[in-house]
Amino acid sequence: MKPATLTSSAALRQRLITADGASHLAACSIAPRTIEVEQALCRMFDDLARPGFWRACEEQADQARRLFAQLIGAHPDQIAILPNASVAAYQVASSRRWRRRRELLASTAEFPGIAHTWLNRLQARVRWVGSCDGVAQTDDYLPQITPRIGMVSVPAVTYRDAVHLNVARIADAAHSVGATVFVDAYQAAGVMPLTVDGLRCDYLVAGTGKYLLGLPGLAFLYVRDPDGPPPTLTGWLGRVRPFDFRATVVDFPTHARRYETGTPAAAAMYAAVAGLTLVNGLDLWQVRRHTQQLITAATRRLSAHGEVLRTAAHPDAQGAHVALFDPDADAIAAWLGDRGILAAPRGRVLRLATHAYTTDDDIDAACASVVSYRRHHRNQSGGR
Ligand SMILES: Cc1ncc(COP(=O)(O)O)c(C=O)c1O
């Protein structure tokens, strides 16, 4: 079946499978359930029951690479499919030569899986930008970019506070000293327009289970020049002709499939194609304007009720979610969950994430529930 071509946020909203009146404000953590992904999983089960399942899987992989390349303005030969962003980061670190430029500049706002991968690559010495409580801004990077830096790692949008960094500015500074640039676009891809040329990055990673509207279990790695030194982790899909099944030969193709390893998660692959088809049918400039309006409205309303938010001074420096500080973010998320609102707690922060399908009513309901949670707690503690 041909997937629907979507042009509006309202049309996407219709594809969500949610209980009546429920709000999904958690795409920074997990994508909402959609009709398209359910149909894709049914197709996978049909394919499983027929001869040629692995051929069908290969076709899904080709389609997934093509759709992701289209999303970020790349060529499918620059895209590798990997199980998660951490493995993608490992593949990048291991395929770089760190002898001359031993330093890797990363930020304390990095998603831990990426930061840990950098720390665990002993050939590179990690230098940090940002505060010890995990906040980094564009200007924090610039003075730290010196000729000793081999690679700069930048999250396009930070996972906790949704700080939208100016990657292109950082990339220009990095390239001016001969360093390469790795972008973690997990919190940006699918909910705002971005291209690898616009970002001027050398590597970019994004997983499918959040704003790309697929399932967890799959990540894409973009490599601008894939024909460099090979990664140290490999598998049969990283070969020039994988279907020759030659156990005694390790060769690497000149395209990005050299970064791939073994059999991918089939369900996540089918879901990725469905999610990317939905996302590629959206006008992401319009989606960006829409989410910025929603975030501005949520920020105004929550601040007026005395909530502590960490939001950017300008909407352009803010990603698609708003982070509300609370020492017990799980408790407030549970309160919202009981009222049909799925939010995303992370540590001492409750995140409310917006997407094309998010409405003013979703934001109103979430803000009202936060207010009722506070009132309930004030009453419980006798107004102290
Ligand atoms: C910015 C960012 N990077 C990476 C990840 C996930 O990394 P991995 O796919 O290695 O689990 C997340 C997920 O929560 C994220 O928000």
Image (tube, rainbow, N blue to C red):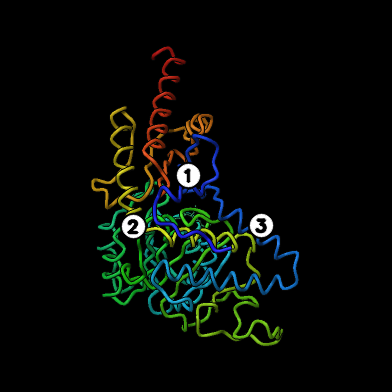
Give residue 285's position: percent from left, percent from top: 32, 57
Q: Quadrant of residue 148?
A: bottom left
Give residue 102's position: percent from left, percent from top: 40, 73
Please determine whether, in this image, residue 58 is positioned above or below residue 359: below
List the residue tagged with mark 1: 26
Numbered circle sitting on residue 363 = none
User: The disc labelled 1 sits on which kind of residue?
Assistant: Ala
What is the crowding at mark 3: few (fewer than 14 residues within 10 Å), some, or many (at least 20)? Answer: some
User: The disc labelled 2 sits on which kind of residue?
Assistant: Val
The label nearer to you, 3 versus 1, is 3
Q: Quadrant of residue 107?
A: bottom left
Give residue 314's position: percent from left, percent from top: 24, 48
List the residue tagged with mark 3: 42
Q: From mark 3 to mark 1, how far is it between C-alphas?
A: 25 Å
**Assess mark 2: CB under 8 A from ligand 1?**
no
Whichever of labels 3 and 1 marks the residue nearer the N terminus, that label is 1
Q: From mark 3 to mark 2, how far is it between C-alphas?
A: 46 Å
Instruction: Depth check: give the residue in front, 240 or 5.
Output: 5
List the residue tagged with mark 2: 129
User: The disc labelled 3 sits on which kind of residue?
Assistant: Cys
Give residue 35's position: percent from left, percent from top: 56, 51
Residue at left offset 53%, top offset 61%: 3
Contact between labelled residues 1 and 3, with CB atoms less than 8 Å apart: no
Quarter of the rendering occupied by the C terminus = top left
Instruction: Depth check: give the residue in front, 163 or 229.
Output: 163
Secondary structure of the residue carrying tag 2 is strand
